[in-house]
Image (cartoon, rainbow, N blue to C red):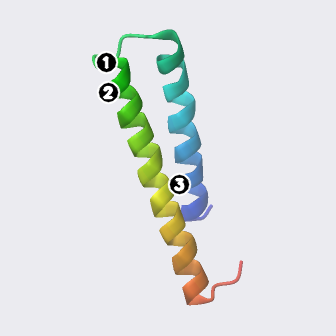
Amino acid sequence: MSLKDKLTAAIMLIALISIPFLLFGNPTGLSAKAFGAVSFGIILVFGAVNLILVWWDSVGGKKQ
């Protein structure tokens, strides 16, 4: 399993865990806005890292 696949799985797992908390208002110790912002920020960072890894692979000329 490549690093790109692991990052994609992590993004989906974070999104899957965050959705019930945001939908049903479970107590997390943060306000709903703060929890949503943190969840979105984490997903955004992993997405940016994924884009950088794709770019790095294309520049390196790696073929899968």
Residue occupying the point 48% across, 70% down = 52
Q: Secondary structure at mark 1?
A: loop
6, 15: nearer the viewer:
15
Question: Is the C-beta separation of discs 2 and 1 under 8 Å?
Answer: yes
Counting from the top left corner in percent of width and height, residue 62 is at 63, 85
The answer to whether 1 appears left or right of 53 in the picture is: right
Quarter of the image for residue 32 reads: top left
Dot 3 crowding, Cα within 10 Å, few <14, some 14–19, many 20+: some
Which mark lies nearer to you, 1 or 3? 1
Query: What is the three-letter code of the residue carrying label 2?
Result: Ala
Counting from the top left corner in percent of width and height, residue 54 is at 57, 71
Quarter of the image for residue 57 reads: bottom right
- Which quadrant does the N terminus fall into? bottom right
The residue pinned by badge 2 equals 34
Q: Which of pointers 2 and 3 lies earlier in the amino acid sequence?
A: 3
The residue pinned by badge 3 equals 7
Counting from the top left corner in percent of width and height, residue 51 is at 53, 66
Q: Residue furthest right?
A: 64
Q: Could you give the CA–CA distance between mark 1 and mark 3, rounded to whole angstroms?
A: 27 Å
Dot 2 crowding, Cα within 10 Å, few <14, some 14–19, many 20+: few
Residue occupying the point 32% across, 27% down = 34
The residue pinned by badge 1 equals 31
Q: Is residue 55 above or below residue 42?
A: below
Counting from the top left corner in percent of width and height, residue 6 is at 56, 54
